[in-house]
Image (cartoon, coloured by chain):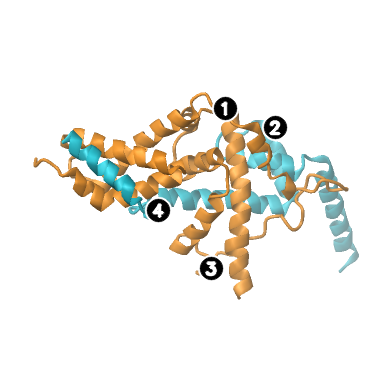
Chain colours: A cyan, B orange
Amino acid sequence: MNPIARQYDKARHAVRYFLLRRLPTCKSVAPMMSESLERKLSLRERFVLKLHLGVCVWCVWYLDQLHVLRDACRERGAGPQDVAGAGQAAMPDDARDRIRRALEEQQ
Amino acid sequence: MAIPDPTQWLDQHGDYLYGYAMVRLRNPENAEDAVQETLLAALKSHETFSGRSSERTWLVGILKHKLIDQYRKTYRESPVPDAELEAFSGDEYFRDEGEWVDHWKPECAPIEWQVTPETELAQGEFWEVFDECLSPLPDRCSQAFTLREIDGLTTDEICEALGVSTSNLWVLLHRARLRLRRCIEINWFRREAAAK
């Protein structure tokens, strides 16, 4: 590695370290990332989050994966056979009989 | 239009509706009530069934309203139990001491998800893992997540159904996502990586 590249690397490391130490922690940006799926974050929140994501790849993956999960879930919900739980739990026979009686009374 | 035979609906769609209700209500009695009320309502309003959608889609549409009624009934005057939420904070994913306190513990930190044909999310086996990960969550936490992410209800609709404030809902969703993401990572993405 040439000296300039080494200096640059060191400086980058120092900035990253400084930011990670000074910025809100992963624990405090995690709820913010979740809320970013629910509402528009304030200017301050967006700024802080952006800086944090600039130096923390774990949180970059975290936010990315929240979106992956949302997309997958929404697709499942919109699916023609909405598999979400349907067919997993068969109705107990006694429940079916009670409902059958209720329907016959109503007819 | 011919007079419908609701017992036929029960035979054809009963299990489907019940399963749909069970995942969302997590209580067999409430699920049974919701299915019964759905079929009774369908009987009363079968003229409105246009035949444009499938019978099942029409019944699920009615069921969705009945589910909201069930939530309201369950959660009326029942604030979010703080103890339940506290026990479910996800704090243990973050370091509790040292220089990097409150940052991810390395063993709990997210890993990059390698999406390959085997880890493709839109397949049946993934949803089995997903459902297993959702089931240990506290009721309101899992319900908030399902209503928001799978059913796509608005924040206001969910707050009303579950009887929680907006900020409570955000906490519920955050905790659900924190847990669920981790569980899916361990049981889907890491498992697939380990199998290679």
Considering the numbered disc 3 on the image, is that residue within a helix, a strand or a loop? loop
Residue A22: quarter of image = top right
Looking at the rendered image, the disc whose residue lies closer to the viewer, 2 or 3, is 3
Cα distance, mark 2 to mark 1? Answer: 31 Å
Direction from residue A68 to residue B157 in the image, left or right: left
The relative height of residue B177 versus residue B37 in the rendered view (above or below) is: below
Q: Tell me the residue at 63%/54% (across/down).
A: B182
Looking at the rendered image, the disc whose residue lies closer to the viewer, 2 or 4, is 4
Q: Residues within 10 Å of mark 2 (few under 14, many from 20)?
A: few
Q: Are marks 2 and 1 in contact (CB under 8 Å)?
A: no
Looking at the rendered image, the disc whose residue lies closer to the viewer, 3 or 1, is 1
Q: Residue tagged by mark 1?
A: B79
Cα distance, mark 3 to mark 1? Answer: 43 Å
Q: Residue tagged by mark 2?
A: A44
* Residue B67: mark: none
Q: Chain of mark 3?
A: B
Cα distance, mark 3 to mark 4? Answer: 30 Å
Q: Amino acid at mark 2?
A: Arg
Quarter of the N terminus of chain B within the rendering: top left
All told, the count of numbered labels is: 4
Q: Residue tagged by mark 3?
A: B116
